[in-house]
Each structure stands twice: as structure tokens, then as C-alpha cells.
Image: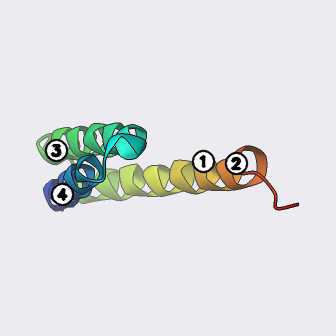
Amino acid sequence: MFKVLGFWALIIAIMFLAGGHHFQIPAILFFVQALLFYIFGAMKLTEKTYMYLFGGYMFISFIGMVWYANFMMKMPA
């Protein structure tokens, strides 16, 4: 399943690249995610370990999204 996630992350990264120079940072982030997902998929770990990896990934993503929304986005005047 991680290889499927890597494929879709790669597709999203390519679409960000097609969006122009304003989307280079998200494209790089999705390329890194695609690489990590593919590496995790090739490790042949147990299903429980994969669930822990995915749970950790979701936790870190949620914390990053909340941090960015609270501290990096500008509030309207």
C-alpha cells in the first residue's frame, strides 16, 4: 500500500511542478514523501509496523498542518 501512496504522491508532485514556480516547495515536499513511501513499501515489514509508520506519518502531518495554519498563515485585516 505504501507503494500506491508513493505513486500518488509522485503524481501530485508532478502536478505541483506543472503549476509553475510558485509551487516548487510543495512539489519538493511531495517528491520526498513519494520517495519515503516507496522506500517503506520496499522494506517488507510486518503489517503492524506499517500501521505504526502510517499512524506516525498522519500524526506528524496533522501537527505540521495545524502549526502552519496557526503560525505561518497571515490573518485577514
CB atoms at circles 3 and 2 under 8 Å apart? no
Query: Disc 1 on helix, strand or loop?
Result: helix
Which of discs 3 and 2 lies nearer the camera? The answer is 2
Total labels drawn:
4
Query: Disc 3 on helix, strand or loop?
Result: helix
Q: Determine which residue is flagged by label 2.
A: 67
Q: Determine which residue is flagged by label 1.
A: 64
Q: CA distance from mark 1 to mark 4?
A: 22 Å
Query: Looking at the image, is mark 1 or mark 4 earlier in the sequence?
Result: 4
Q: Determine which residue is flagged by label 3.
A: 38
Query: Looking at the image, is mark 3 or mark 1 earlier in the sequence?
Result: 3
Q: CA distance from mark 4 to mark 2?
A: 26 Å
Q: Position of residue 22 (x, y in %)?
A: 42, 44
Q: In the picture, residue 76 is in which quadrant? A: bottom right
The residue nearer to you, when weighing 68 against 63, is: 68
Q: In the picture, residue 24 is in which quadrant? A: top left
Q: Determine which residue is flagged by label 4.
A: 11
Can you tell which mark lies on residue 43? none
Which of discs 3 and 1 lies nearer the camera? The answer is 1
Q: Position of residue 40 (x, y in %)?
A: 22, 43
Q: CA distance from mark 3 to mark 2?
A: 27 Å
Residue visible at 22% across and 52% down in the picture: 18
Q: Position of residue 6 (x, y in %)?
A: 20, 52
